Amino acid sequence: MNQDLNKIKLTDRSQVVSNKKMTLLEKFYLPAIFKGLYVTFTHLFRKKTTIQFPEVKRPVSSIYRGMHVLKRDEEGRERCTACGLCALSCPAEAITMVAKERLESEKHLYREEKYAAVYEINMLRCIYCGDCETACPKEAIFLTDRFVPSEEARDNFIYGKDKLLEPIDARIDVSKRQTPEVLAFKKDKTQLHNK
Ligand code: SF4
Ligand code: SF4
């Protein structure tokens, strides 16, 4: 039984360890050093696998899920009504918000009677699953193809409305994330989700 077990190999690359004494040449390490330098030298003429990020960016899929955007409507008003569905559906509990009632004088700022006075996403907790986007009945939050920039302090990864809200003069195209199927579902008022 033990003999059979000894014959079992996990890979074909396993080698029998030997206590062979090093030759004089091996003791100088020079052959090994030259061999290593040769390998390094041959890499100089190969196609580079690195890119000059951030000047150069790798192409991403059209459905890449990157940094979120809080959308405005056609008139520039914030679409989010602070219903909290995105936060409820977030498996990472990355979203927090504070809801406020809209004042009469704020109708040009917020589309609904209620809006998110504070809306924050912890980008270090987020797993970019897109559930917040799917849950939102107001077409207010979308993931985009933008990267979250690197930071040194953890606090800087708490993104508030200053970073998430779409600028009025630089609207962010999310049409790739609004497939006909998604749009049809969100217009279907028989779905409780869309009421
Ligand atoms: S993408 Fe997923 S994990 Fe990130 S905030 Fe949205 S629901 Fe949460
Ligand atoms: S689900 Fe949409 S409308 Fe509701 S709080 Fe989230 S982003 Fe705002």
Image: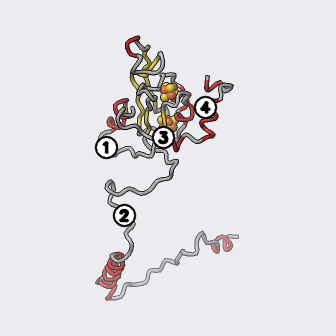
* Real-space Cα separation, disc 3 to disc 1, in angstroms: 25 Å
Question: Which of pointers 1 and 2 lies earlier in the amino acid sequence?
Answer: 2
Residue underneath mark 1: 151
Q: Residue at x 29, y 43 (%)?
A: 152
Q: Position of residue 71 (x, y in %)?
A: 44, 32
Q: What residue type is labelled 3?
A: Val
Res. 186 mark: 4
- Left or right of residue 185, residue 15 in this image: left
Instruction: Answer with the quarter of the image where residue 46 lies.
Output: bottom left
* Residue occupied by mark 2: 50
Q: Which amino acid is tagged 4?
A: Lys
- Badge nearest the viewer, 3 or 1: 3
Residue 87 visible, this angle: no
Hey, what amino acid is under mark 2? Thr
Compare marks 3 and 2 and give the one earlier in the sequence. 2
- How far apart are the two marked residues, 1 and 2, measured between alpha carbons? 21 Å
| Labels 4 & 1 near each other (Cβ < 8 A) | no
